[in-house]
Image: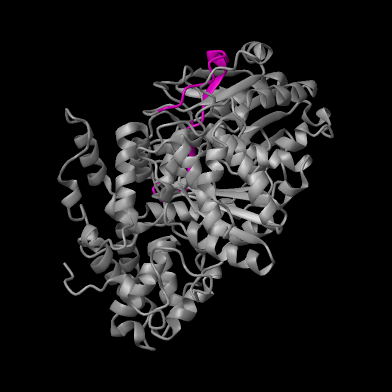
Amino acid sequence: MNNDRLSLSTTPHSANPYQPGGSLPPDAPTYVKRQADTDLYQALMTGTYCYILNARQMGKSSLRVHTMGLLAAQGITCTEIELSGIGSQQITPSQWYGGLIQEMVSGLGLTFKRRSWMQQQDDLSPVQRLSLFIETVLLTQISTPLVIFIDEIDSVLGLQFPVDEFFGLIRHCYEKRSTNANYQRLTFVLLGVSTPSDLMQSKQHSHPFNIGQAILLQGFHLNDCEPLIQGLSQHVSAPKAVLEEILYWSGGQPFLTQKLCWLVIHRGNEVLQNSEATRSEIRDSVAMLVETHLLQHWEAEDEPEHLRTIRDRLWREGQTNRSVLKLYQQILQIGSISSRDIPEHFRLRLTGIVEVYRGKLRIKNPIYATIFNHQWVAEVEASLNEPNGTGETNMGQQTILGLPQPVQRYPIPSPPLCCPTAITPKRGWLLDPAAIAIGLSLTIIVIALRSIGLLEMWELSAFDHWMRSRPPEGADERLLLVTITEADVQSQPIEERGAASLADRTLAQLLTILEQGQPRVIGLDIYRQQRVDDQYPALAASLASNNQLFAICYYGNPGVSPPPEIPAHQHGFNNVLQDTDGVLRRQILAVTSPSPCQNEYSLNWWLAANYLVQEGLEWRNDDSYLRLGPVSFKRIQSSTGGYHHIDANGHQILINYRATEQIAETVTLQQVLSGQFDPSRVKDRIVLVGVI
């Protein structure tokens, strides 16, 4: 253990500008502006309600402080209510709502006698008193535009009484803009670590989430990090190269990035100050810092607390929902999985250990992957399987499990290899015995290396390069993609859709419009495990009787069941097979054990087969091959092509990617529902509906 480690909070600001943990002040020289800064500022300048729900230590508080400074410069009054400061244990509704009022009185310096006023309004409910305070006191004493930031919103989950009326009041303030101009000056921002569906206990109340703008808070990118480079420039000779290595290890996670910058200044060796240091030496020096001060004895070195926070939240999720832990274990095993709009994915994201990247859930950085590795997960599962099921073991005192010595770099996809330069043989080369011997030796070496799989990644990369080098094919006219974007999701009332991406009413409208255009087949690439609500019997009947509609499921453990109304012969799994470098090169068309799916074929097989049957091409499964008309889809073997002893179970084929930027014509959900969409655009096409 490092016995002379410094407290990160004791370093003078002038000596070290980096601050891991806590809110950065508005003038902090190392504050990194992200897209979220622009999105939040622009939204609040137009009076749009916003919410920022993300994992801890992603910079929400610093974003709030920085934005409050910018808004104040524009003459907009701001105040913050930190709900955790009001309390949640053994507190009554009257005390809690009274605490909200007091926070606003203190934060805005209002002239107001709270106790006597509340006694005068004793005949009102707590939420009615808060509503009256906002209208008769707050909006009369504050004449400028006002933004109220409510932080730690997830602390309401610890209250012993429901707070749906509180969220309903925020929504009510928005709706009163149409009848009371004073409310047009009032805007709310909600920040915390939760999902809207967790915060809402009842669908009977109106809520602010479906009228607010979700602000997406992502990690740092190198192009945004000039302030961090400037801070390093006085301490290292190659600040940009050092920061690139820091971002490699942190994955852009704000807390870890600031902490590693701090460590470089205080714990960096002379290599980082040497102007002649090579990139390899810089890489090794930063890796040694990570190993010494973050990975070895990580719980003792975790000050301010960060890794333990992730550990504890992941443990809690494992105790309440084993599928979240299994989901993380699955990502550990295969590198990434498709991100889905389901509760388990949201909860795993809120632990902070994973992120969404290009539609995939992946572990956020090598530090997390090294600490919370397979052995760690196995021990958590073992502890949860004990009789008390609490997971309370000696893991809290463990050192890092399975740490490689020395630390190795986290595996990342290999870049495509360039085509080798042609070499013209010298005259007489074929007659040179030495050359022949060298050639035979190299041939034997290549065969030997290939036989044990060491050339697999090289061969697959060459295959990728060849696939990308083909001439463009153009968009496929047989397809129409209906995408559900974040804006499409937010356009639907949250009391209707809940945590789903597509509400029953919206789905009914969409299918009605699409069916008018007479598509050949519709693929619903959205998980729907819940039955259609009883108030939409026509939709339930349509799902059960429409033989053109196919829907997805996900086989495995845990799996995702298909929509209960759609017949079993119209289910299709959408599992994908990732190679070890995270690239999709194979497609699985059929499996023998698809549970909980009730059909052994994939969604894409069903869509293609039902489209082509109208061309007179029947499909069949014989001689161990799937066939569409005259075309046979031969199964790949465990060592097909560049592969070496892969798991070839199921009917797997290589994917024939289309060499084009635009696969097919694409429209959004809102465009289809706008009334301006021409249904004839779907005639005789495959229509695929999915979230992006």
- What is the residue that sits farthest to the bottom in this orientation? 275
In magenta stretch: residue 25: no
Q: Position of residue 10 (x, y in %)?
A: 31, 75
Start-end of magenta stretch: 559-588
Q: Residue at x 19, y 49 (%)?
A: 396
Q: Relative to residue 443, is residue 488 drawn left or right?
A: right
Q: Quadrant of residue 259?
A: bottom left
Q: Position of residue 580 (x, y in %)?
A: 39, 48
The answer to whether any part of residue 377 appears in the image is: yes
Quadrant, the N terminus: bottom left
Q: Residue at x 44, y 31 (%)?
A: 161
Q: Check the image and report above or below for 211 versus 689.
A: below
448, 123: nearer the viewer:
123
Q: Residue at x 69, y 67 (%)?
A: 74
Q: Relative to residue 236, is residue 603 drawn left or right?
A: right
Q: Quadrant of residue 567?
A: top right
Q: Position of residue 479 (x, y in %)?
A: 70, 34
483, 226: nearer the viewer:
226
Q: Check the image and report above or below for 626 versus 494.
A: above
Q: Check the image and report above or below for 659 versus 18.
A: above
The answer to whether any part of residue 286 appears in the image is: no
The mark total stands at 0
Q: Quadrant of residue 563?
A: top right
